Amino acid sequence: MPEEETKLKMKMSYLNIPIMFKYNVYNRLFVEAGPQIGFLLSSKITADYQDEDVIFEDGFTLDDKEFKNNIDFSIGVGASYYFTKNIFVGVRYNIGVSNVYKKGTDIIDDDGTYGTSRNGLLLVSVGYKF
């Protein structure tokens, strides 16, 4: 009998507050880096597949915020380029430094050991500076 796969979709919403330090490296090219703090607003898991061994039905949504840390810390690094005095494009990657799950929550890696889960975020922006 083939093993059935259960697919889960996790959606977390944060209010993020970055403090970025920007440096003009050349002409209109800038690099930036700095810390970011995020506040968890909601966290939900949805089952995309039904399996008799899974406790929830197909499409069931579980609010799992109680298992997550309410505050998330990360470090942002990026660059931006100004085409004109006001119009720019930018890219930034935020590297998570804090564990998403609360201490004592069972997160198991593929090799059977307990692990951690950190957020990562890639941002691409186009903007107008007033």
Image (cartoon, grey):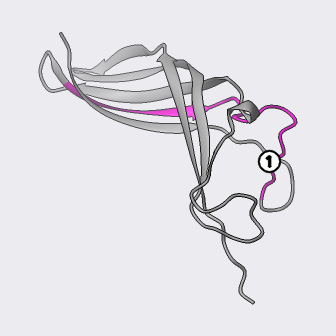
In this rendering, the answer to whether 115 lies above or below 3 is above
Residue toward you, 96 or 77:
96
Counting labels gives 1
Q: Amino acid at mark 1?
A: Ile
Q: Residue 5 colored magenta?
A: no
Q: Position of residue 106 (x, y in %)?
A: 84, 45
Q: Name the residue carrying label 1.
A: 107
> Picture quarter containing residue 25?
top left
In this rendering, the answer to whether 81 lies above or below 109 is above
Residue occupying the point 74% across, 71% down = 52
Q: Position of residue 129 (x, y in %)?
A: 20, 14
Residue at the extreme left of the image, as rendered: 84
Residue toward you, 102 or 45:
45
Q: Is residue 26 left or right of residue 95?
A: left
Identify the image quadrant of the C terminus: top left
- Crowding near the residue tagged with mark 1, few <14, some 14–19, many ≥20 C-alpha atoms within 10 Å: some
Q: Is residue 97 left or right of residue 30?
A: right
Q: Position of residue 63 (x, y in %)?
A: 65, 39
Point out the stretch of residues depicted in magenta: 88-109
Q: Position of residue 68 (x, y in %)?
A: 71, 32
Q: Residue 93 colored magenta?
A: yes
> Tag 1, which secondary structure?
loop
> Picture quarter containing residue 49?
bottom right
Residue at the extreme top of the image, as rendered: 130
Q: Is residue 109 left or right of residue 94?
A: right
> Picture quarter containing residue 72?
top right
Identify the image quadrant of the N terminus: bottom right
Residue toward you, 106 or 90:
106
Residue occupying the point 62% across, 47% down = 45
